[in-house]
Amino acid sequence: MEGVIDAHTRDLLTRQPGFDWTVTEFVRVVDARLPPKVFLRHCPELDRRVTTPSGVPVALQLLGSDPAALAANAEQARKLGASAIDLNFGCPAKLVNRHDGGASLLRDPRRVHAAVAAVHAAVGDEIPVTAKIRLGFSHRRLALDCAKAAEDGGATQLVVHARTRDEGYRPPAHWEWIGRIRRHLSIPVVANGDIWSLEDYWKARTLSGCRDVMLGRGALADPWLAPRIRHWLATGEQLAATPWQARAKVLADFAALQRITLPDRIVTSLVKQWLNHMRQRDAEAAQRFQAVKRINELETLLARLAQPHEAPAHGTLEPA
């Protein structure tokens, strides 16, 4: 979710009850202790009790492969006030993997263990260390070994994306494999991958046996997915589909927050990026995206998104 889930997005997605916690975009760790400004850029919430404005906790995520460097930066983050450290062993991006980060470590469970153990030793029991993995790099044969390596290293929770790195984001998600992992671990396991709807949520829980799930692209596609799940769990009632007007309001609020610090041309690109996620699962969002994708002026873009849906021209025949 690099480049997408920044502090403003976390703020907007947590304004309605639904999420129990959130995670930052990853802080890339190579071989040196990073200055405080890097952590504050990725996690401005460090300046406000490490929660979103609505009070939802934020974990700071690190991505790297050198145990000593990860430990030094985890300690730096702890001193700055981080309330949890999350380690990213799931990123499938080719550039990240070529530089020995993310899912590349899943080829050797010993490296997963070394990274988690080093970070856990650096922060002790003062703050929890969690991790996210996939089912493997090019195959699933080491999935359980990597999961156990994270637990043995000191992780207090494990998120599992239900695909290998080579599978990327291609359907299907193998939620049943998360269940195989969960049955062998004593720490909480969280299911992740292809949860786009209430139905997907229940299938992921049923097949994995996990109590909790993590939402990523699904929350961008429908900003009300987490509240929809929370409402159903509390009442048994299924809320109506998210209308376009609500989606347009989120995009407008997002633009207003981003404009505080970014030029309009960059904000225009960011709004389109979020709309691109929405169009994957919503017909009207897809139509709106096609209508505005070549607009480069922010005010014009927002005005077009706020317009009511255009009715068919007079005399146009519609299918019965």
Image (cartoon, helix red, strand yellow):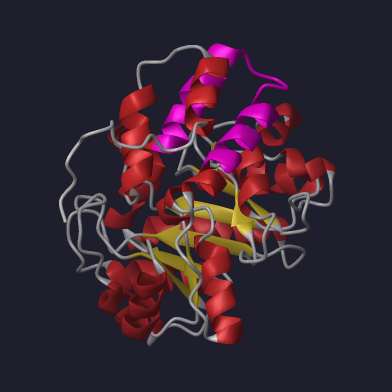
Q: Residue at x 58, y 66 (%)?
A: 227
- Please state the extent of the stretch shown in magenta in the rendering: 248-275
Res 285 → quadrant: top left
Residue 42 visible in the current orientation: no
Image coordinates for residue 233, horizontal then vertical, percent? 55, 82
Res 143 → quadrant: bottom left
**Residue 4 vertical position relative to residue 221 in the rendered view, above or below:** above
Q: For the C terminus, give its image quadrant.
A: bottom left
Quick one: 233 or 292, which is closer to the camera? 292
**Residue 92 vertical position relative to residue 34 in the rendered view, above or below:** below
Image coordinates for residue 261, horizontal then vertical, percent? 70, 20
Quick one: 101 or 45, which is closer to the camera? 45
Q: Tell me which secondary structure the magenta stretch mostly adopts.
A: helix
Q: Which residue reaches farthest right?
A: 48
Residue 76 visible in the current orientation: yes
**Residue 154 vertical position relative to residue 37 in the rendered view, above or below:** below
Image coordinates for residue 170, horizontal then vertical, percent? 20, 53
Image coordinates for residue 180, horizontal then vertical, percent? 30, 82
Q: Residue at x 76, y 53 (%)?
A: 51
**Residue 46 vertical position relative to residue 167 in the rendered view, above or below:** above
Judged left or right of residue 286, residue 233 is right
Asked if residue 273 lies in the magenta stretch, the reply is yes
Q: For the N terminus, give its image quadrant.
A: top left
